[in-house]
Amino acid sequence: MKGRINRQNLQKLERTPASAPKKWLWDTEIPCFGAYRSENNQVSFVYQYRMPGERSIRSKVLGIGGEITLEQARGLAAEMAFQRRQGIDPILEERRKAAEEKARTDLIMANYAAAYLQRRIDAGKPLNKAQTRVIERDIIGNLGDLRIDRMVVEDVEAFGKTMGDRAPSARRMGLVYLKAILNDAKDRGKISVSPALNVDTPLAGKRVRRLREKEIKRFHEAVRDIGDVRSDCLEAILRLGKRKEEVAEMTWEELDLPKQLWFLPPDRTKPGEAFLIELPRQVVEIIARQQPDQRRRHGPVFTLNGRTPTELGSQVKDMVDAGMHRRIELAEGGFGEVDRVAHYTIHDLRIRCSAGTSTRWETSSSACTAGWTMPPPVRSGNGRRSRSAIRRTTAPAASCRRAFSRTSTSTTSPPDRSATGTTMPGGWVFPATTPPTSPRRRGRRADQMVCSMA
């Protein structure tokens, strides 16, 4: 039936049973605008149309009487009729606007990168802390306000230049993970082509920088000049030769100070394997003074606020560099010219120490025969399952230890484990007797090795 849709005509509409064809009232003023009364006596307003050149009929429910007024329904129908006369499909246009509104939040780099990290976790392939830090600090920090579907090559190149001004490695890592995020968006249909496709990523160069003994001494002195927890953390990195993040994120739960042991879990190591590290006396003293009250020893060891690990970013490195150059200038004023310090990174300390590192204890299958008890399979940082036993403990080589003092006077021996075994976090069991050294190594037995750093 046709007629102007008003209150009188709506009251005349008969109910339509659920299984019967609808009894329509089509408006004579606005084409394609209609209404019908359902079985439960509710009036529904509908705009039903066909675009020029198409055979399919599209329908849009504008609302139900009581939730929307007749005047509001008529206004919506008039707007859709106007769009149809302009050659615009009203339903497709509404979907486009909804997608655009959703993209305003979902395709912002900060939101999309956070969702990307969560999808990796849900898929069982989480990024490690260093990789997550690149995305959160560098990519979100510099590109967080941009929409990925509106990024251009110039945005990627500007990001690479910003990272390159900090360090070549920062540029490489930033571009690697930016490309990973943009490729993920392309695979999921969010963008048609990645703007970073033709931006070259620099290859990772092999660092051969090894600090000399004089440079390590200046570094050690400059580190102590800082005078807070960051000073202790850097000195522990220098003495242990471990990665910066591994030491900085050390927790009290990983330590057994009475036995001078540090259990480094597989989710915090680059190879995704567990390490049991024997701590030298000097490092034990550094750790112990971070929190004298044993009742409060929980959470991160090196912390400024008691909740999160201390950050060892570029600002701390600049403080150390300033202290080293200040000492060089003072030395030049009093004792003549001294050697300058070339560019270095904190990781270069590890390269110097690992150049002559001594393997302390047995590894993998040979360790099992020596009495090591293996825990259940552990999910490593890269998502793979690993049953590897505690890999090894290391001490800096003699060439690195000489930088701490002219004479090595320490006589501290490894703790006595002849009586009882040691159970470490995660189910790792340290045997009562020290495993023998691997046949592939000709070094001394572990119980004969001491760390002689002064």
Image (tube, rainbow, N blue to C red):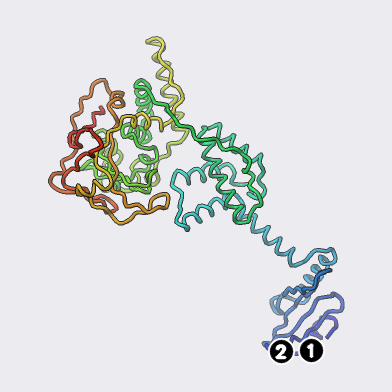
Hey, what amino acid is under mark 1? Lys
Residue at the disc numbered 2: 20
- The image position of residue 19, as x and y in percent, is 68, 89
The residue furthest right is 29
Closer to us: mark 2 or mark 1?
2
Secondary structure at badge 2 equals loop
Res 312 quadrant in image: top left
Does 158 sit left or right of 1 as displayed?
left
- The image position of residue 327, as x and y in percent, is 40, 19
Q: Marks 2 and 1, how far apart in space?
A: 18 Å
Q: Residue at x 58, y 41 (%)?
A: 142
Camera-side residue of 116 and 361: 361
Res 412 quadrant in image: top left
Hey, what amino acid is under mark 2? Ala
Q: Residue at x 47, y 33 (%)?
A: 314
Camera-side residue of 346 and 8: 346
The residue furthest front is 440
- The image position of residue 288, as x and y in percent, is 27, 39
Secondary structure at badge 1 equals helix
Residue 451 disc label: none
Does 337 sit left or right of 408 as displayed?
right
Seen in the picture, residue 298 relative to 19 is either above or below; the reply is above
Q: Residue at x 53, y 52 (%)?
A: 114
Residue at the disc numbered 1: 12
Does 384 sit left or right of 419 as displayed?
right
- The image position of residue 81, as x and y in percent, is 82, 69
Q: Residue at x 70, y 84 (%)?
A: 42
Seen in the picture, residue 302 relative to 381 is either above or below; the reply is above
What crowding class fits label 1: few (fewer than 14 Cα within 10 Å), some (14-19), or many (20 or more)?
A: few
